[in-house]
Amino acid sequence: MFEYLIMAIFAGFIGSIMGLGGGVIMVPTLTSIFNIPIHKAIALSIMGVVATSVSGSSKYFERKLTNIRLAMYLETATTVGALSGALLALIMREGSLYLIFAVFAFYVCIAQLHSIRNEEKERVVIYEAHVRRVTNKGFFNFSGEYYDEYKETNVKYEVCGYLKGWLISMFAGVGSGLLGIGGGFIKVSAINIFMKVPLKVAIATSKFMIGVTAATSAVLYYVCGVVDLGLVAPIVVGTTIGSYIGTLVMNRLKSRWLALAFAMLVAYLGLNMLFKGLRIIGVMI
């Protein structure tokens, strides 16, 4: 059980810093190292994702990094996607799940490398007048401000690309239910790249959202009897501890080197899952 706890702490820590649930680390680790069937690994990962979201998002909220209104808007898409993904996961073949996860992992790698450049260029962005008029009215007032401890300054931002962000968040929800991940890496990319929100706010907002998304899928997995209750405790405790530690240091860090290291790790895990999936379907020996 101790090895599961250590793995979960690491996954929770990395997930908290990067706005992920940790599933992108837990699923391939549970299947490749601990030889747990992928459907059970996905269900355990979902439980850990819920725990890390609850632990991490509260700290980010206290520091005003989380954009609650934006999260509520995007969560309408991810919840629908999560239910669809969970239903697909229960009927799909094991080899197909490995291959889909590999594709997602490669996307994570590319997105994280892209986020390095965005972090270097992060600044207050002034949008055109028609965009500003929309964001300053009613529910779509998603603009915000936070204090960046690394830069030691307040950062103001506006939000755009509502439709793109909503559609990509739905895709993230499908990934959550289908692959046992929180969909955080897709949400961070959607919020940061397509909606022009600062990276640290995107991470905190994603962290808040993934708990709701994962909880939707977790109920379905539990009802279907896929959850291994004997392993839930170390996974949940570990991700909670790791997530809490991550929230204490995230706003003090420069994301560049951490994002680069994480991208390389995910690329390795993606290759591992790709080869395993190909072997299962008989393409490789």
Image (cartoon, grey):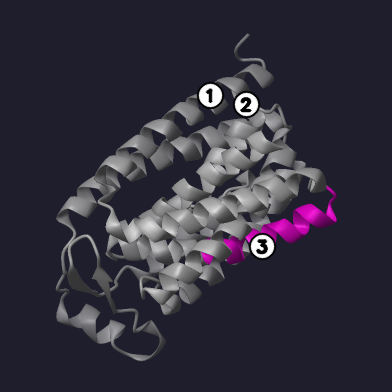
Query: Label 3: how many residues lie within 10 Å, few (<14), some (14-19) or many (20+)?
Result: many
For label 3, the residue is 215
Q: Earlier in the sequence, mark 2 or mark 1?
A: 2
Residue 272 — which label? 1
Q: CA distance from mark 3 to mark 1?
A: 27 Å
Q: Can residue 92 be seen?
A: no
User: What residue is rendered at 58% in x and 51% in y?
Assistant: 239
Quadrant position of the N terminus in the picture: top right
- Report the front residue among 258 and 214: 258
Position of residue 275 relative to residue 218, above or below, is above
Q: Quadrant of residue 168?
A: bottom left
- Report the front residue among 182 and 234: 234
Q: Which one is in front in this view, the residue at disc 2 or the one at disc 1? A: 2
User: What residue is rendered at 34% in x and 79% in y?
Assistant: 142
Query: Label 1: how many residues lie within 10 Å, few (<14), some (14-19) or many (20+)?
Result: some
Residue 46 in percent (x, y) is at 65, 51
Query: Disc 2 vs disc 1: Cβ atoms closer than 8 Å?
Result: yes
Position of residue 215 relative to residue 264, above or below, is below
Q: CA distance from mark 3 to mark 2?
A: 25 Å
Callout 1 amino acid: Asn
For label 2, the residue is 32
User: What residue is rendered at 44% in x and 77% in y?
Assistant: 68
Judged from this view, the residue extending furthest toward the front is 2
- Report the front residue among 30 and 277: 30
Residue 217 in percent (x, y) is at 69, 57
* Range shown magenta: 209-225
SS state under label 1 = helix
Residue 111 in percent (x, y) is at 35, 45
Q: Quadrant of residue 158?
A: bottom left
Quadrant position of the C terminus in the picture: top right
Residue 68 — which label? none
